[in-house]
Image: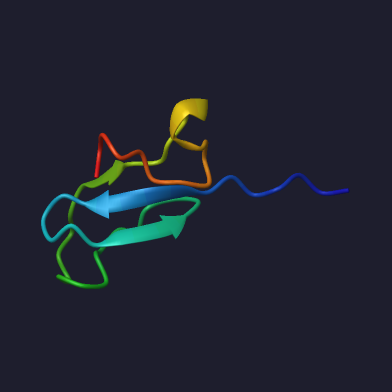
C-alpha cells in the first residue's frame, strides 16, 4: 500500500488566500505574485489535528 500524501493548509502572506496542498505554489493563484506562504495547519489535538486550520494562525 502506498503512503498517504502529506498535505497542509498554506496561507499567502500577501492576500491571505488559503490552499490545501502538499507544497505551496510558487506563484499565488489569486494575487498572481511570488509570495511567501505560511503553514497554518493545526498540529495539536486540541484544535482537531492536521485536518483543520490552527485558529491561532488564522
Q: Nearer the viewer, residue 38 or 40?
A: 40
- Picture coordinates of residue 57, whole percent (x, y): 25, 38
Q: Specify whether residue 22 is in view.
A: yes
Relative side of 46 to 56, left or right? right
Residue 19, picture quadrant: bottom left
- Picture coordinates of residue 54, whole percent (x, y): 35, 38
Name the residue located 52 percent from the left edge and 36 percent from the top edge.
49
Snapshot colouring: rainbow
Residue 32, picture quadrant: bottom left
Residue farthest left in this picture:
14
Relative side of 25 to 28, left or right? right
Name the residue located 47 percent from the left edge and 56 percent from the top edge.
21
Relative side of 38 to 19, left or right? left
Residue farthest right in this picture:
1
- Picture coordinates of residue 29, whole percent (x, y): 27, 72
| Tally of numbered discs | 0
Q: Specify whether residue 44 is in view.
A: no
Residue farthest front in this picture:
46
Of the 4 image quadrants, the one containing the C terminus is top left
Q: Nearer the viewer, residue 14 or 57?
A: 57
Q: Nearer the viewer, residue 21 or 47?
A: 47
- Picture coordinates of residue 36, whole percent (x, y): 20, 47
Relative side of 11 to 54, left or right? left
Up-down relation of residue 35 to residue 57 (above or below): below
Amino acid at each position: 500500500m502506498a503512503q498517504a500524501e502529506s498535505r497542509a493548509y498554506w496561507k499567502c502572506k500577501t492576500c491571505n488566500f488559503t490552499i490545501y496542498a502538499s507544497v505551496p505554489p510558487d506563484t499565488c493563484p489569486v494575487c498572481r505574485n511570488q509570495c511567501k506562504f505560511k503553514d497554518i495547519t493545526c498540529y495539536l489535538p486540541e484544535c482537531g489535528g492536521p485536518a483543520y486550520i490552527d485558529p491561532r494562525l488564522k
